[in-house]
Amino acid sequence: MSGARALKREIRQVLADSGQDKAMARIGGHRPRQAINALISHFYEADALIRWRAVAAAGIVTADLAEAEPESARVIMRRFMWMLNDESGGIGWGAPEAMGAAMARNSLLAAEYASVLCSYIDPGQNFLEHPGLQRGLLWGLGELARVRPQMAAWAAPHIAGFLDLDDAYHRGIGAWAAGNIGSPENFDRVHALTSDRAVIEFFENWQLYRVSVAELAQRAVSAITRTQQEE
C-alpha cells in the first residue's frame, strides 16, 4: 500500500512540474497497470491542470499499451466504461476524456470503442445526464475527432443541443468538437457562437488555457469550412 501511495505522490509531482515528453517518460518507467491506477486517482484532483494532465496521460498509457498488449488496453478501456456505469457507485470523472485521448492515439482502440463513446451523447443510447460528465464527453469526442473525425461523426447531430445551453463549457467545448468532426449540420449554431464572449478553461497540448467561446467557435467555423472545401 505504501508503494502505491508513493507512486501516486511521484506521479502527481511529475504531472505538476514536467512537460508532456518528460512526464510520459517518467510515467512510462512504471508498469502500465500501476501507472493507470495512480493516474485515475488524480482524476479527482482539485488542481485542474493536474487533473487534466492525468486524464491525458492515462489516454497515452492506454494507447501505447494497445500496441504491445491489446487485451490489457481493452481491460483499461472497460474500466473507464465501468466508471461511467451507475452500478460503479461513482461519477466517472475523467473517463470519457481518457477514452477519447486513447482512441485519438490508437486506431485499434478507436475501431473498437468509438461507438461506445458516441453512445454517451445519444439520448437513445447510454446518454450521460450529469452536466460535468457531459463537458468531459464533449472534450473526449472532440479529441477523438481531432485525429479520426469519421469515427465521431455519429455524435455530430447530438452535439447541436449543447450549443444552445446556458453553460459556457457546453457551448465552447461543443463548438470545438463540432469543428473537429467537420459537421455541416452544426455550422449555423457554431457560427452564432462567434460573438459569445464567455470565457472557459480549455485543455490543449498539456496546458490549461483561458479562452472565449467565441475563439473556439471561430476555430470550429474555419475547420468546418475547410472540411467542406476538401470534400
Image: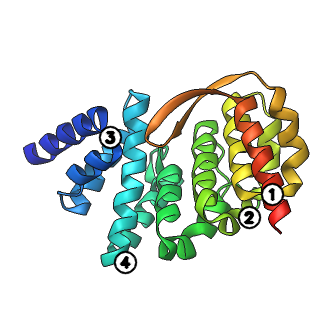
Instruction: Categorize mark 2 by other alpha carbons within 10 Å: few (<14), some (14-19), many (20+).
Output: many
**Would you identify the image quadrant in which residue 150 lies?**
bottom right
Query: The residue under label 2 is which amino acid type?
Result: Ala
Residue at the image position 30 percent from the left and 32 percent from the top = 16
Q: Amino acid at mark 1?
A: Ser
Which element type, helix, strand or loop, lies under badge 3? loop
**Residue contact between numbered discs 2 and 1, judged by CB atoms under 8 Å:** yes
Mark 1, residue position: 183
- Establish if 162 lies above or below 29: above
Asked if residue 191 is positioned above or below residue 213 in the image, the reply reads below
Q: Amino acid at mark 3?
A: Gly
Residue 153's disc is: 2
Return the x and y of residue 87 as percentages of the image width and height: 48, 55
30 with respect to 22 (left or right): left
The disc label shown at residue 170, or none:
none
Left of 219 or right of it: where is 186? right
The tally of labels here is 4
Label 1 crowd bin: few (<14), some (14–19), many (20+), radius 10 Å? many
Helix, strand or loop for disc 1 = loop
Q: Closer to us: mark 1 or mark 3? A: 3
Q: CA distance from mark 2 to mark 4?
A: 25 Å
Which amino acid type is shown beneath numbered disc 4?
Pro
Q: In terms of sequence position, does the residue under pointer 4 or pointer 3 come before the other? A: 3
Mark 1 in CB contact with mark 3 (< 8 angstroms)? no
For residue 119, side relative to residue 32 (left or right): right
Q: Which residue is mark 4?
A: 70
Residue at mark 3: 19
Q: Position of residue 120 (x, y in %)?
A: 64, 57
Badge 4 crowding class, 10 Å Cα cut-off, few under 14, some 14 to 19, many 20 or more, is some
- Describe the element under mark 2 as helix, strand or loop: helix
